[in-house]
């Protein structure tokens, strides 16, 4: 009975999540046009912060309860899913072409790559300094928060480059009230938070019923569950051809997950780090490198469908490996 109820809650969560993503993308895109702000900036900030809320809530709870395997596994698994699964699916729906001059290729994606590298450095006290164990300390958390502030500065600095991001808006678009779009964003964020929470909670119960370990649960069920807002949002954005939101959401979310979410989590409670997680950090780095290289192969500044299929194949192989060795 408990398993059946968990499955029902999981399905309802999906419905709420997808509708929330639709409202969020529509509201954010309308506001972007109204104020002539690039969709990329909206994706990097409002949307990415909103879709990272499930990771933040899950990690805060996991950290306070000492479930560090879930806290770290959630972020690593989520970031891998964001690039390999979400951008892979989104690029199949509609090829993701990044506009020139917005800084995504030379700043956004490299910063996402840098976040994974910095996490690997901060977390590997055992390998780098020869300590008996590795841990993300509160000091490491403050370092992460500092990098997040730099990321936010970069995001908003894009909006100042109006010559590169100028958007055509009609008089009716400029005169329309932004109240309804703001309401849509709030409803969308609530839908994403509630739907994501229901999905994660029910998925954890299902995983527990099936006898999965905490680490494997964090890297798979919880990670995929907390990435569903990004999946729903980016897929919907790709379907609506709001490519900048689709890409900005994922890149911004990955940076937010490591610098903000893990930063806050380690400040709440220092997080012991298992060296086996270096495998997952390595895949994060590889996925970011592939995304960067994809901007120069095939159509320039574009993640083409075949490149997205490669990412999905990498993710399927990764999940298969985890389950086989779990």
Image (cartoon, rainbow, N blue to C red):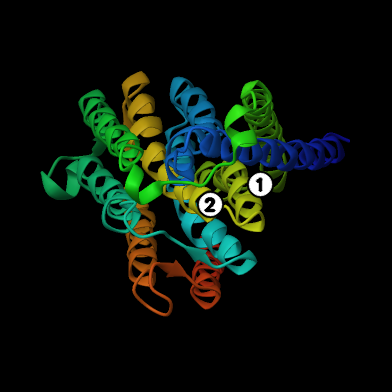
**Residue at figure coordinates x 32%, y 41% from the top left:** 158
The residue to which callout 1 is attached is 211
Residue 38 circle label? none
Q: Label for residue 246?
A: 2
Number of callouts = 2
Residue at image position (37%, 33%) is 262
Which quadrant: the N terminus? Answer: top right
- What x and y, as percent, mark residue 221? 61, 47
Residue 261 is situated, as x and y percent measured from the top left of the image, at 40, 31
47 over 175 or under it: above or below? below
Q: Nearer the viewer, residue 220 or 115?
A: 115
Residue 201 to residue 223: above or below: above
Element at label 1: loop
Residue 29 point in image, percent of width and height: 58, 40
The residue at 65%/31% (across/down) is 197
> How far apart are the alpha carbons under marks 2 and 1?
35 Å
Say few, some or many: other residues with alpha carbon within 10 Å of mark 2 (under 14 / 14 to 19 / 20 or more): many
Which residue of the protein is positioned furthest toward the right in this rendering?
1
Picture quarter containing residue 41?
top left
Q: Earlier in the sequence, mark 2 or mark 1?
A: 1
């Amino acid at each position: 009975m408990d398993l059946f109820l968990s499955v029902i809650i999981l399905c309802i969560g999906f419905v709420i999540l997808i509708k929330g993503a639709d409202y969020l993308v529509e509201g954010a895109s309308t506001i972007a046009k109204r104020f002539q702000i690039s969709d990329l900036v909206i994706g990097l900030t409002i949307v990415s912060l909103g879709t990272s809320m499930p990771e933040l809530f899950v990690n805060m709870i996991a950290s306070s309860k000492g479930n560090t395997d879930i806290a770290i596994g959630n972020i690593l698994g989520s970031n891998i899913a964001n690039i390999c699964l979400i951008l892979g699916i989104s690029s199949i729906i509609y090829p993701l072409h990044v506009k020139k001059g917005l800084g995504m290729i030379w700043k956004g994606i490299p910063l996402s790559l840098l976040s994974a590298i910095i996490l690997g450095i901060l977390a590997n006290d055992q390998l780098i300094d020869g300590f008996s164990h590795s841990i993300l300390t509160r000091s490491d958390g403050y370092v992460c928060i500092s990098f997040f502030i730099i990321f936010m500065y970069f995001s908003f600095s894009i909006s100042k480059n109006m010559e590169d991001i100028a958007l055509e808006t009609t008089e009716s678009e400029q005169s329309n009230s932004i109240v309804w779009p703001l309401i849509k964003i709030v409803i969308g964020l609530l839908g994403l938070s509630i739907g994501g929470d229901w999905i994660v909670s029910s998925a954890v119960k299902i995983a527990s019923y099936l006898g999965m370990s905490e680490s494997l649960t964090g890297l798979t069920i919880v990670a995929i569950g907390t990435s569903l807002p990004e999946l729903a949002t980016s897929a919907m954005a790709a379907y609506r051809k709001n490519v900048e939101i689709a890409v900005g959401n994922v890149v911004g979310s990955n940076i937010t997950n490591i610098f903000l979410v893990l930063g806050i989590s380690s400040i709440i409670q220092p997080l012991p780090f298992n060296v086996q997680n270096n495998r997952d950090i390595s895949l994060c780095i590889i996925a970011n490198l592939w995304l960067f290289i994809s901007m120069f192969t095939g159509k320039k500044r574009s993640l083409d469908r075949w490149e997205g299929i490669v990412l999905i194949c990498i993710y399927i192989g990764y999940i298969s490996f985890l389950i086989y060795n779990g």
